[in-house]
Image (cartoon, rainbow, N blue to C red):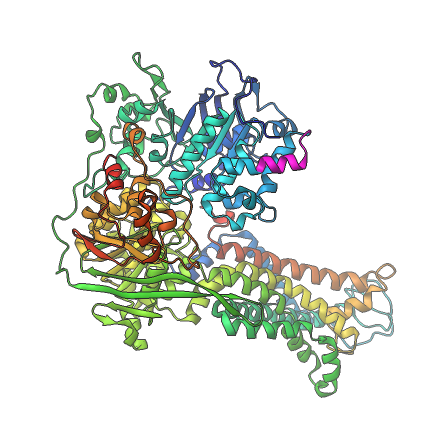
Amino acid sequence: MTEPLTITGKRAPAVTPVLEVDNLSVTFGRGANEVKAVRGVSYHVNPGEFLGIVGESGSGKSVSSMAVMGLLPSSARIRGSVRFQGRSLLECSDAELSGIRGKDISMIFQDPLSALTPVYTVGHQIAEGLLLHDKKLSRQGAAARAVELLKLVGIPSPERRAEAFPHEFSGGMRQRAMIAIAIANDPQLIIADEPTTALDVTIQAQILEVMQEAKEITGAAVVLITHDLGVVAGNADRIAVMYAGRLVETGGVDEVFHAPAMPYTIGLLRSMPSMASSQSRLVPLEGRPPSLAALPPGCPFAPRCPLVIDACREAEPALSGTEEHPTHQAACIRSSEITSGKLTRSEVFPRPAPVLEGAPAGTDGREVLSLKGLVRHFPLLKGAVFKRQIGTVRAVDGVSFELGSGQTLGLVGESGCGKSTTIMEILELAKPQQGQIRVNGVDVADLSKRDRLKMRRDIQVVFQDPMASIDPRLPVHDVIAEPLTVHGVSKKDQQRKVAEMMELVGLDPEMASRYPHEFSGGQRQRIGIARALVTDPKILVLDEPVSALDVSIQAGVINLLKDLQLQLGLSYVFVAHDLAVVHHIADHVAVMYLGRIVEYGTSDDVFSRPRHPYTQALISAVPIPDPALERTRVRVLLDGDLPSPTDDIPGCNFRSRCPLYQLLPEEQRLRCRDEDPSLRTVDDTSVACHYAEHDALIDTVAKR
Amino acid sequence: MSMVEDAQVLPVTPKAQKRTNRPTSRGRLIFAKLARTPRFWVGTLTLLVIVLWALFGLAFYAYNATSQDVMSMNTAPTGNHWFGTDEIGGDIYAQTVVGLRKSLLIGFVVGPVSALLAGFIGALAGYLGGVWDRVIVWFIDLLLVLPALYILIMLYPLIKGGSWVIVMVYLAIFSWMILARVIRAQTSSLRDRDFVKAARFMGVKTSTIIRRHIIPNVSSLLIIDATLGVGAAILTETTLSYFGFGVQPPDVSLGTLLSSGTGAATTRPWLFIFPAAILVITVLATSLAGDALRDAVDPTSGANRD
């Protein structure tokens, strides 16, 4: 029962690839509705190799791996060949495939919540996978093995946790459980489809670590599908970049990152906000992937490519390598010019010049928004008819900050730390449970109903998901004009104002009578921004405005936000979990943990010299899109997940995960346990840590 | 298959440059889409013909619904009696036309009214939540468990006069509850969606939010229920008439005609077939038009992805 998870002798000789995909194409629909989601993709994965497949949403990267697994609906037409250990998977029946799936090939999905069945315990679900493929295994044996697997993927007290249901697990733990299921049968190949996209950076770092471990233990090859180049930089051996259903560049991770030969790859790399530099503007990759329903002849990237020449529009270039680097292939007729250094990366995608220079227009740095000791506790109730309080969720537990006009405050932290509750409290413009909210110097608790309505003009919000924040059944004009309808603006003025706003955010006013679903994600977020700006507000609350967008589109939206701030003198409260983005846009940063601000200071200070161990861990968890740096980096890893905000933790509430606490001698730990640290000034930043001057961790972070 | 969905979104190009600057309102957009759907025209034109026929069908006809032709009893359709006669010489054509008037009125009042009641009450409960929600749901549950028919029987002595109007009101009052609970559940999930939150933070009034955001987003259900409700109401009226409520002789409705004709369906089919055919055509036409309306209100429906 307790056989070790080692490489068994059944592996093929090292040179034969585990997976060979040759000229795979997938087509949905027929006739005019035909969508060629994958168009002739060929790649191979060697035993024990880590392949990263990178591409924007809609590039066909998920569809191609679903085709490999045989998980596509029967309406999809699949051509080409997929050979797994020499066996052709496309010719296998579904029953034969079921014997391979979960045993030799296993898959890790993006959303660990929907990938686990909510009505069975986690242990049961792991055991199910084991029993399915090993008829000789007893139930007790499978259960024991499940516990062992949970322990292997780093779940604390696995015996107890195996009895838990998926909803009792946090997102990171569920993904660990998924990995446990994936490696349960000692597979030859693990396909991971965006396994960390739904997770926080700190948890993402943990999961990537576990995946590397799982790969080493089972000796399996891994195919990691992602849109985030940073994720693959430190982990993958080889990279394949997909665009419009085809591979456009493949090669070793160092080759692709350091000498990309395809303009698309260059664009992706340049558009990423980086922790290493905080240049004022990002490099957007304009446009959007082409519709796969009716592809024009020629290179599909041509409409977005800055290097486009007439020959590009004639025929689609094939993947080809150079003589010195036969394994590094790119599908671009000008790739030799790029690799030979005739065209440098900054020439291909130059950094755009800002619309305006200098300080935001008409601002004097006066305070526009201030929070003093804001508290928001939710009672935890139990009982159906007579509810009684059994606890308190301390969502926001004494938050104070100030925002000057024309400034940006970045509010960062893991999900569940209370940052969203904080801004919702601000937006309610109501009297908080405790503390004070002042907008433009006026305490919102004292507002009359009419004044509050008036104040709503000055403070507007942009939400995270442009799909969810715009009513799908309202034409765009009505969406953008909605804030004006409240304030009795005439129809004619509404139209004028909406056209003006659409122009401002870079949308064509002619499109005002279209429905939101006709716009791309980036365009929809621009609609959201236009709606927020239509009342000429002073303060914009941005709730993760770019985290639902592709990296290439992210850059354009961030640039737009920066330009608008300069043009209109706006003040931003920018909530994000992506620290690189915050580094680019924020003047001040507040790091939140369990409803409190643990570090507060100027962006430069906080990012260059983080004082709080939590901030240090957050910063070190952000992947850097540079394989050489990423491999040598020493990480400050956090243990476990965010504790429940219902727990009443004496002393410092970060203690349970604090890496610094582990390093401290016992007599110093005592203080962390007994005394709740409050914000105090260290150098120029405010830090809530007793030992912020301790340099043990700072040294490791500085090495990044 | 979200990635396929993504790929199918067509690139937005500024076409139709000559269009005026004024953006089209939602109402106009919906109508423009309706006008482009053949289903809508087939449905509405058929309904229009049926309504006109119900109104003017007896204008040039020799008999009326109460006349009895003792010379021809139990005859199959002839040039004289277009739909034939029953056992006492009543003219089926005339009865069908008169019955249709009543049934159309009942169907087209009860179906939409109950859907609207369900929509607003359900949306209100779901959106307001808290105490209001509990009170409304309690009220809905109360109506659901009430033995509705017995109440009607008990109240019958009081309402003898305008009997079939009472039946209409009765049908409307007792047919919206289940849909209202469905709408309530949908609304409470819509309430947490960001676009509703955004509207609240803009200071939009509750009634406006329900009208502008909630009702259009649950409209598919409402439209389906309203169109199916038309047929259901016409048939339920039959049951009530059978028990002695609603339409009483010598008054007729499609329902009473059907129930009296069912027994003769195999021997004297004309008693049954004509009223039944009219009912089926009416319900089908309503469904067609309703279906087209549902697609027009939903911008992402396949039919109008242009």
Quarter holding residue B75: bottom right
Q: Position of residue A209 (x, y in %)?
A: 41, 34
The answer to whether A219 appears left or right of B286 in the picture is: left
Tell me if residue A411 comes above or below residue A184 in the rendering: below
The residue lying at 38 percent from left, 38 percent from top is A205
Q: Magenta includes B179? A: no
Outermost residue to the bottom: B158
- Looking at this view, is A542 or A501 the one in front? A542
Q: Position of residue A461 (x, y in %)?
A: 31, 59
Q: Magenta includes A142? A: yes
Whether residue B20 is visible here, answered yes or no, is no
- Looking at this view, is A612 or B121 the one in front? A612
Outermost residue to the front: A667
Quarter holding residue A59: top left
Please state the extent of the stretch shown in magenta in the rendering: A136-146
Q: Position of residue A241 (x, y in %)?
A: 37, 28
The residue lying at 51 percent from left, 37 percent from top is A151
Q: Main secondary structure of the magenta part?
A: helix
Number of numbered tags placed on the structure image: 0
The residue lying at 27 percent from left, 45 percent from top is A581
Tell me if residue B121 comes above or below residue A689 in the rendering: below
Whether residue A209 is visible here, answered yes or no, is yes
- Looking at this view, is A394 or A38 the one in front? A394
Q: Position of residue A676 (x, y in %)?
A: 32, 58
- Looking at this view, is A673 or B79 the one in front? A673
Outermost residue to the top: A323
The answer to whether A697 appears left or right of A13 in the picture is: left
The residue lying at 11 percent from left, 50 percent from top is A358
